[in-house]
Image (cartoon, helix red, strand yellow):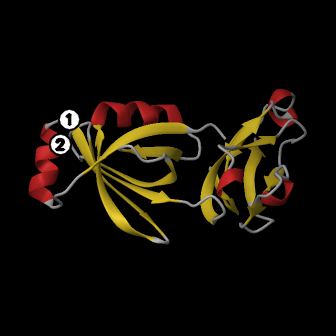
Amino acid sequence: MNTLTINASAREQAGSASSGRLRAEGRVPAVVYGKSKEPENLSLDARELRILLRSIGNNTPVVQLKSGEGEARTSIIKEVQRHPMKDSYTHVDFQEIAEGEVVVLEVPVHHKGEADGVKNEGGTIETVSHTVSIRCLAKDIPSSIDADVRALKVGDNLHVSQLPKIEGVEYLDAPEQPVFAIVK
């Protein structure tokens, strides 16, 4: 898993007025919560957040959240709110995950290789499920799951049960759920 870090600052005030002032200063209000801790209000640099989200791209949004002098905390970006008209972020929710904590989350699935049905039969690969639900320890979270589609012919599907086995990762979706399909 590729770990990215973002710096955060604690914020004393909450509410729309103080959040508006933060945004005017080029910062984004945020909150971090976890199973064994009270929610903590934070603020992030808007430019640093934009760079982080671009770096994550279509991968699992696991980051190291560093605030103040404390140690970086492994967190999952649960929600990113955007302004409906402007190209700006208005709020971010992080869920902190402890070292030995089992988490359930959605992980992106990417196809690898060129399917035989695409290469030789004029088919097209269709992504049926962009993500799959998994359960694992925080240290085992994959950034994405790469599925080999080279053997698929027109009319074939690749199901959740055919995704690569990853040590410590359990797929929660139905085994017969299609992920990729080759169509004519």
Residue ID for mark 2: 23
Whether residue 41 appears in this view of the structure is yes
Label 1 Cα crowd, 10 Å radius (few <14 / some 14-19 / many 20+): few
Residue ID for mark 1: 26
Identified by mark 1, the residue type is Gly
Direction from residue 69 to residue 123 in the image, left or right: right
Residue shown at 48%/47% (left/top)?
Answer: 71
Instruction: From the top left corner, tell me how far across and down residue 140 is, in percent.
Output: 72, 52
Task: Write down the quadrant of residue 115 in the picture.
Answer: top right
Instruction: From the top left corner, tell me how far across and down residue 161 is, in percent.
Output: 84, 60
Identify the image quadrant of the C terminus.
top right
Q: Is residue 148 above or below residue 91?
A: above
Instruction: From the top left corner, tell me how far across and down residue 100 is, in percent.
Output: 66, 63
| Residue 114, label in figure | none
Q: Is residue 129 above or below residue 49?
A: below
Task: Write down the quadrant of residue 46 in the picture.
Answer: top left
Direction from residue 82 to residue 161 in the image, left or right: right
- Tell me the distance, in whole angstroms, between the alpha carbons under discs 2 and 1: 5 Å
Whether residue 57 appears in this view of the structure is no
